[in-house]
Image (cartoon, rainbow, N blue to C red):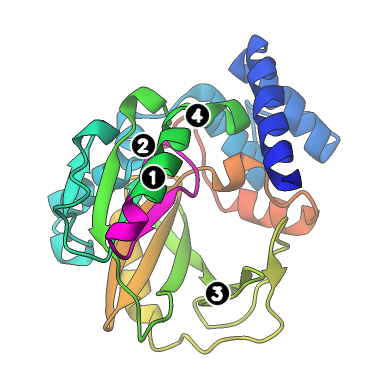
């Protein structure tokens, strides 16, 4: 009940903040987070580059690749069709979803939203998923992060087979790419209730990234056998962009692209690590566009 009250209060509070235009909102929230104003014309920190990308507006390609279905089409276009999970369906309205017709188990993933995945293991789960999805449909997630590449009018509902590995969640790898170069990997430990995760480089060495939420793992996983395939795939996917995070899974030794993220946590990251914020910012050659020359 308390969490539900907080969620509703948060929703109403950010809806009230709609009276502030996006750029002013982003400037003010940046100042409240980092206690300094962002240098948008000549960004140096990682967080400043993300703000500059937001305020100057996304390219058509970034808008396309911000959608989960759009990412799959993009991967097919560049010859990586074998590295996506084939959809069972893609709809632009929840009324078009054929809940009883898809082979179970399956998952409905929502684009232009945040962390909304609805798993249907059996017919008994359908009504619950439908009701939750209606709540999701009524929310405009731009009110929280003011990300210009997301819009509820462009929202899609992607139905995929629900894939697990021996009953466990899939291994989750998020590859941070700077100027067309995969540089770091965020490894999320499967089935971790505390969202345990760690940032590694491509030598499988830990990187001193400070997460704003979740738990930074104390142990270092050995993912060295997957690094060549992750690097090769992410290198092809990230090529046009000055910065992107390519979110991947590994299914039976096959690396697949789940989605592409351009503003991790809405761009409000590394507020507790100035050194990494500066280091990551120095690796992005931003010249006024999210696309490389």
Circles 2 and 1: CB atoms closer than 8 Å:
yes
In reply to whether residue 103 is colored magenta, the answer given is no
Question: Visible in this render: residue 61?
Answer: yes
Q: Earlier in the sequence, mark 2 or mark 1?
A: 2
Provide residue 89's location: percent of width, then percent of height.
17, 48
Q: Is the residue 100 above or below the residue 209 in the image?
A: above
Q: Nearer the viewer, mark 4 or mark 2?
A: 4
Rendered image: mark on residue 139: 4
Would you say residue 121 sits in the magenta stretch?
A: yes
Q: How dense is the environment of label 3, judged by Cα within 10 Å: few (below 14), some, or many (20 and up)?
A: some
Q: Do labels 2 and 3 touch, CB within 8 Å?
A: no
* Among the two numbered marks 4 and 1 on one chain, the one whose residue lies closer to the N terminus: 4
Q: Is residue 238 left or right of residue 136?
A: left
Helix, strand or loop under label 1: loop
Which residue is located at x 66 percent, y 42 percent? 47
The reply to whether dot 4 and dot 1 touch (C-beta < 8 Å) is no
Label number found at residue 62: 2
> From which residue to which does the magenta span run?
111-126
Decide if residue 272 is on the left or right side of residue 143. right
Residue denoted by label 1: 241
């Amino acid at each position: 009940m308390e969490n539900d009250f907080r969620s509703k209060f948060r929703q109403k509070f950010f809806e009230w903040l709609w009276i502030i235009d996006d750029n002013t909102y982003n400037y003010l929230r940046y100042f409240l987070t980092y206690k300094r104003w962002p240098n948008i014309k000549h960004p140096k920190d990682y967080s400043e580059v993300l703000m500059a990308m937001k305020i100057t507006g996304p390219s058509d390609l970034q808008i396309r690749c911000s959608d989960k279905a759009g990412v799959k089409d993009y991967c097919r276009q560049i010859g990586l069709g074998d590295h996506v999970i084939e959809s069972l369906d893609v709809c632009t309205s929840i009324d078009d979803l054929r809940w009883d017709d898809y082979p179970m188990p399956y998952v409905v993933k929502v684009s232009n939203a945040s962390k909304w995945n609805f798993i249907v293991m059996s017919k008994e789960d359908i009504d619950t998923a439908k009701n939750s999805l209606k709540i999701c449909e009524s929310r405009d997630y731009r009110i929280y992060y003011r990300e210009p590449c997301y819009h509820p009018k462009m929202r899609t509902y992607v139905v995929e087979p629900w894939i697990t590995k021996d009953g466990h969640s899939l291994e989750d790898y998020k590859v941070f790419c700077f100027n067309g170069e995969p540089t770091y990997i965020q490894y999320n430990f499967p089935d971790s209730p505390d969202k345990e995760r760690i940032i590694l480089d491509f030598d499988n060495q830990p990187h001193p990234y400070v997460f704003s939420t979740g738990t930074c793992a104390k142990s270092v996983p050995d993912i060295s056998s997957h690094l060549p395939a992750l690097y090769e795939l992410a290198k092809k996917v990230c090529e046009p962009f000055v910065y992107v995070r390519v979110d991947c899974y590994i299914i039976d030794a096959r690396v697949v692209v789940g989605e592409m993220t351009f503003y991790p946590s809405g761009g409000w990251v590394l507020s507790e690590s100035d050194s990494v914020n500066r280091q990551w910012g120095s690796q992005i050659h931003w010249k006024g566009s999210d696309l490389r020359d």
